[in-house]
Image (tube, helix red, strand yellow):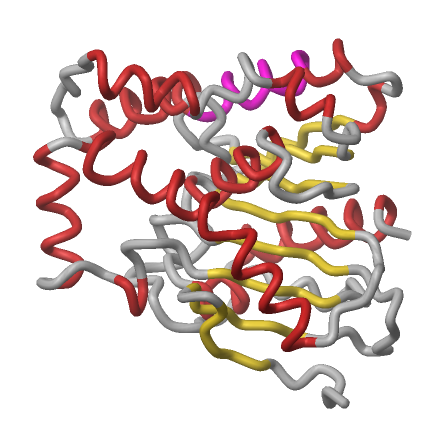
């Protein structure tokens, strides 16, 4: 029997994870599956510290993204950045999001057995790139979730990549292969697919100071697209956190760190939404 509130860490089907059990373990306990961002917090352990969801009596399972944390390419973070400068979509964003979604079912199956997860309701939580993974998992039916919280989300990859390029003072040269990746990672266009897989209750949380064209506007478009397709439009909402930018932790964002005020606010919103929707 797992000791309540004692985190576990390990690797499931090649995917590193941190799992925190509920305060009152039971076969029907809810489960929240979470993916971190590539900005701080950029590992599963750091994300678990930034958004611990301690107000939620549920399993919280934080998964590490490909090409991050213990799976950084040879040469570490500098090598990762070089890959991004060479081709941000084909070398970085596309492979990370697509591999994370593709490796999830095997990791989920192994985690269910290893942790003794029962038949409780499931939610997903993702931030930035991790939110793109969560949306892809939902849109392609890799997990039937009852609820989702998407923080600083990559909703439309093309808009996000152009925003990041502007931040670094460059222009990304879109090509047919990279546009094909962007089409797969466009969840406004794929809103009907998310709706068709059980109409999960979706909360979008964005920062007031995040890039408007790259993140805030696409999030608002997704809210409208989902609401127009849901039987109950009230199952979709969006919150703007005053003064918050994109990241949820301070650099370097690889190790657990004290929760920032903005992360604490996101944590409260996420826990409240998931508690209500997974009840």
Residue 183 quadrant:
top left
Q: Position of residue 161 (x, y in %)?
A: 29, 26
Question: Residue at horizontal 72%, vertical 67%?
Answer: 59
Q: Position of residue 206 (x, y in %)?
A: 55, 34
Q: Position of residue 61 (x, y in %)?
A: 61, 64
In the displayed structure, 139 sits above or below 56; it is above
In the displayed structure, 128 sits above or below 68; it is above
Instruction: Based on the picture, tell me whether residue 219 belongs to the magenta stretch.
Output: yes
In the displayed structure, 192 sits above or below 84; it is above
Q: Is residue 220 left or right of residue 58?
A: left
Residue 172 quadrant:
top left
In the displayed structure, 121 sits above or below 147; it is below
Question: Residue at horizontal 78%, vertical 28%?
Answer: 199
Instruction: Based on the picture, tell me whether residue 58 belongs to the magenta stretch.
Output: no
Q: Could you say which is closer to the camera, residue 95 or residue 239?
A: 95
Q: Could you say which is closer to the camera, residue 67 or residue 140?
A: 140
The span shown in magenta is: 215-225
Question: Residue at horizontal 78%, vertical 45%?
Answer: 273
Helix, strand or loop for the magenta stretch, by majority = helix
């Amino acid at each position: 029997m797992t000791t309540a509130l004692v985190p576990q860490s390990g690797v499931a089907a090649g995917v590193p994870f941190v799992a925190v059990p509920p305060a009152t373990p039971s076969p029907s306990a809810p489960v929240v599956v979470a993916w971190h961002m590539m900005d701080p917090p950029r590992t599963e352990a750091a994300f678990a510290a930034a958004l611990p969801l301690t107000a939620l009596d549920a399993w919280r399972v934080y998964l590490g993204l490909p090409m991050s944390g213990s799976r950084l390419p040879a040469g570490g973070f500098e090598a990762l950045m070089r890959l991004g400068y060479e081709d941000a979509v084909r070398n970085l964003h596309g492979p990370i999001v697509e591999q994370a979604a593709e490796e999830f079912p095997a990791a989920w199956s192994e985690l269910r057995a290893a942790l003794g997860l029962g038949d409780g309701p499931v939610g997903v939580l993702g931030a930035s790139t991790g939110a793109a993974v969560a949306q892809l998992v939902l849109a392609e039916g890799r997990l039937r979730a009852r609820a989702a919280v998407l923080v600083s989300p990559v909703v439309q990859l093309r808009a996000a990549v152009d925003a990041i390029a502007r931040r670094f003072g460059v222009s990304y040269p879109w090509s047919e292969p990279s546009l094909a990746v962007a089409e797969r990672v466009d969840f406004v266009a794929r809103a009907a697919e998310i709706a068709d897989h059980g109409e999960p209750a979706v909360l979008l949380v964005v920062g007031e100071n995040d890039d408007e064209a790259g993140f805030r506007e696409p999030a608002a478009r997704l809210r409208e697209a989902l609401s127009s397709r849901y039987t109950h439009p009230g199952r979709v909402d969006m919150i703007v956190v005053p003064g918050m930018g994109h990241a949820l932790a301070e650099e370097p964002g690889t190790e657990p760190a004290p929760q920032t005020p903005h992360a604490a606010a996101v944590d409260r919103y996420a826990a409240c939404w998931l508690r209500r929707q997974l009840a």
